[in-house]
Image: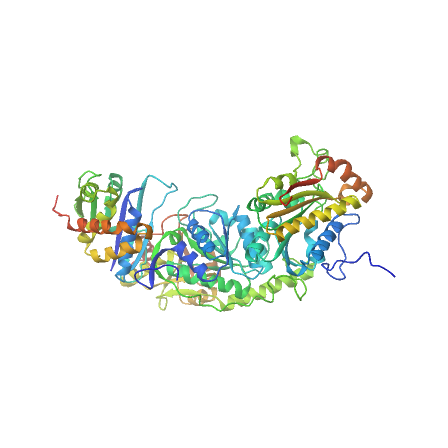
Amino acid sequence: MEKDFIIAGFGGQGVLLAGEVLANAFMLDCKNVTWYPSYGAEMRGGTVNCGVVMSDEEVSSVQKSKSDFIIVLNQASFDKYTSWVRKGGSIIVNSSLAKIAKTRDDINYIFVPITKMAQEKLGNIKMSNIFALGVLSKVSRLVSLKTLEKALYNVIPPHRKHLIPKNIEALKLGYEYDLLPV
Amino acid sequence: MATQVFKIPESFRKNVRYSFCPGCDHGVAVRLVAECLDELGLTENAITATSIGCSVGLYDFLNVDSIEAPHGRALAVATGVKRAKPDKFVFTYQGDGDFASIGWAESMHCAFRGENLSAICINNTTYGMTGGQLGPTTLLGQVTTTSPTGRNIEYYGYPVKIAEHIALSDGTAYSARVSLDSVANIKKAKLAIKKAFEVQLKGLGFGFVEILSSCPTNWRMTPEQAHERVRDEMMQIFKLGVYKDITV
Amino acid sequence: MVVECLTGTKVLMKGNYAIANAAVLAGCQCYFGYPITPQSEIGEFMSGKMQQLGRAYVSAESELAAINMVIGAVSTGVKAMSSSSSCAISLMQEALSYATSDQLPVVLVSVMRGGPGLGNIYPSQGDYNQATIGGGNGDYNIIVLAPSNVQECIDLTYKAFYLAFKYRNPTILLADGLLGQMMEPVEFYDYPYPEIDTSSWALTGAKGRDARVIRSYAPLETDQCVYVDNLFKKYKLIEENEVEYEEYMTDDAELVVAAFGSMYRNVKSAVKICREKGLKVGAFRPITLYPFPSKRLSELADRVEKFLVTEINMGQMVRDVRLAVNGKARVLFKGKAVGAMIDVEDLVEEIEKQMGGV
C-alpha cells in the first residue's frame, strides 16, 4: 500500500512543519516514508506545499500528479489542488480562509474552520497546521493521535519544547471536531 | 684563517641550477626567502603553495614540501593547507599577474580573513613567462607586447598598487613594498620577508611583501638598465615602504 | 551519534543534512563552500558542526576558491570536501582537472539544479556530463557516485571519501535538488571503511626526508606521456574493481528501463506496474556513473531487445548506454530538461508503447 498526502497553504502557516510531523509519525509506525517540499526562489510569501508519501514497501516515486489526501489551508491552495485529489480521495479545506464550494463529486470534501478553531479554542492561529493534522488523523485512519503526539517530540526543537502540550491539545481538538457533512 | 662569508642556503635543493634569465631578480628573491627559512628554522616545517608564471619553478629550487596551485589560486590552496595543518608554516611566492590579476579575489579575501599565512609577490610590471604582455602592474606609458603603443588609461586603466590595498585589510598584520635594485634595498627586502614570516609564527594574521623586481629580458634591457628603470620609473609610482605593521 | 531521536535508530532527515552528517562521521576535517540553492543546508550545517568539533570551516569567497582550498587541505592527507550545484560546479572544473593530475582525494558533493547557465533551482539531472566527462582540460576521470534515496546519500558519502583516498582521485557525489531537499528515515552507522595510509605522499614538512612536490605536470613531452599513462593504469583498476549498479527484474526482460539517481525510483514503480500487466520489462540503475557499468549493460544487450533511458536532462547518460550496448540493442530515450521526475503513469504508457501494447 502506498498513500500520498499534500499539505498546502501560504508561507507562515506551518505547512512544511505539519508535513514533517506527519512523516515522522509514519516513520515511528515503521512505515517507509518520503517528505518533499515545493520550493520557489523567494524566502517569504506565496503558496507553499509539501508532499508526504507513505508506503509499506520502499517509497518508489514522489512528485506525483495525484494524491489521496490533501489539506488546503487557504483559497489559493484549494483552487489549485482540488483537481489533484485522486478519485475517491479526500480534501480537508480550511473554511475560515476558503469558500465552501464543491466542484467534484468523486472526492470527499471535509470543510473545517481551522483558523477560527485555532484562534477560539487554542488562542493561537499558529496552531492551525497541527489542528489540521488532528482532522487528517480521523479522516485518513492511517495515523493515530498517539503517534502524531510522539512525532511532535521529534520535530519541535528543544528550545520550543514548552509548546508541545499546546500542540497536543491542537491535535486532539482537530481529531474531535465534529465532521458533519456540509 | 679563512672565514666563510657566502654559502648556499640549507633550504635550497642540492645541485639545482636556476632556470631564471640572466639578470632577473627572481634569483635574488628566492634566495632571500631561502635565507629567511634557514634563519627562522622553518624549512622542515614549511609547506608552500606554488604559483604559475616565472615563479612556478619554486619547488625545483627550495627543499620545501610544495603543492602546485592553479593560476591565481595559490592563497586559496594555502588557506586549505593552513586550516588543515595550523601548526605548519605556510607561504606562497607569486608573480603580480598571479597575485593581483587572476588571483586578486583569492589574495584579497585571504587578507580579509586574516589567514595566518605569508605571501611574497614579485612585481615586475609584466607577464614574464608568456613573453612580456601587459599585466596589472604595467606602468602608464609602458610598452609591452599587448600595449604596443604604451599603456594608456583609455584602453588599459591604471596599474594596481598591491601593498597599499593589502594594507587596507583589517586581517593584514604586515604589508610592505621593497626593491632589489641595490645592496641596501636587498638587505631591507630580507628584513621585510622575515617580518612577514614572523607575524605568521606569532599568529598575528596575514603577512605580505611586494618585491619590485627587474625583468631585463622582456624589458629589452641590460640588467643594469633594468635596475635603473626599477629606481627611476617603478619606485616613482610604487613607493617603497611599510604600509602596515601591527607589531609596532 | 549526530541526532537523537525517539526511534533510537532511525531519524527523518533531508538529503543535504544526511550528506553533511555522513561527511562529519566519515572524519571530514575541513569544509570549504559558498552558498547556492539547492544545497545550502550542507554548508549551513557544516559551519556550526565543524566549529563545534574544532575542525576547519571556511566561507570561501567563491566556489573557485573553495575547491582550491580543498586541494590545499587534502594535500596534507586529511579528509576535506566542498559542496555546490550546477553553475557553480562549472567554476570548479579547472581545479578538478588539477586535482586528478595531482592525484588528490578531493570529495565534492554536486546537488544538481536546472541549467544551462543560471537555469533555475528546480531539480534536474543535467550535470551528468559535467560530472562524468567534466569541463576541465586534459585526459582525466573523476569517480562519480549517484544516490537515489536519502539513506544512499549517507552510504555513498562514506564511500566517496573511501574511494577518493583509496585511489587518490577526486570523487563526486552526484545528487539532485529533489534528493537534497527530501526527507526520509535514515540510519547512521560508523564509517565502515579502512583508513588509507597517506604517509607516502602527504605534505607534512620535509623533516628527515627530501621535500615532496605535488604537481600536475612533467616538463618534457615523454615524461608527460608516462605520467598520464600511469593515471590511466589507475583508471583501469577503478573500472575493474569499483563498478556498482542495481538491477530489477532483468532476468527475462525484453525491455530494460535505465535511469540514475532519484529518477530510478519512478522507473522501478513503473516496471512493477508493467510486470503486473504481464510485460517483460526490467530496470537498471548505475550507482557508479564513472566507472560506468558498461560491461553489464553489454551482457544484458545480448538478450534484451530495447533499452529505454530516462533522465531529467535532454539525453546525457543515454550516450554511455549506447556506447555500452554498441548496436546490439535499440536504445531509446525519454526525458525533459528540468523539474519533477517523469510520472509513473507516463513511464508505464511509454513502456507499453515501446512493447507494442498488451
Whole-percent x, y for residue C166 in the image: 53, 66
- Residue, x 58% and y 41% (percent of image)? B169
Whole-percent x, y for residue B72 in the image: 61, 47
Q: Is residue C137 left or right of residue C55?
A: right
Q: Quadrant of residue C225?
A: bottom right
- Residue, x 54% and y 65% (percent of image)? C167
Front in this rendered view, residue B26 or B221: B26
Q: Is residue C220 above or below residue A46?
A: below
Front in this rendered view, residue A1 or C282: A1
Q: Is residue B139 left or right of residue C27?
A: right
Instruction: Report the quarter where the C terminus of chain B lies.
Output: top right
**How many numbered circles are shown?**
0
Q: Is residue A52 left or right of residue C261?
A: left
Camera sees residue C315: no
Whole-percent x, y for residue A123 in the image: 21, 42
Task: Single out the residue that lies furthest toward the top.
Answer: B154
Q: Is residue C184 above or below residue A80?
A: below
Instruction: Report the quarter where the N terminus of chain B lies.
Output: bottom right
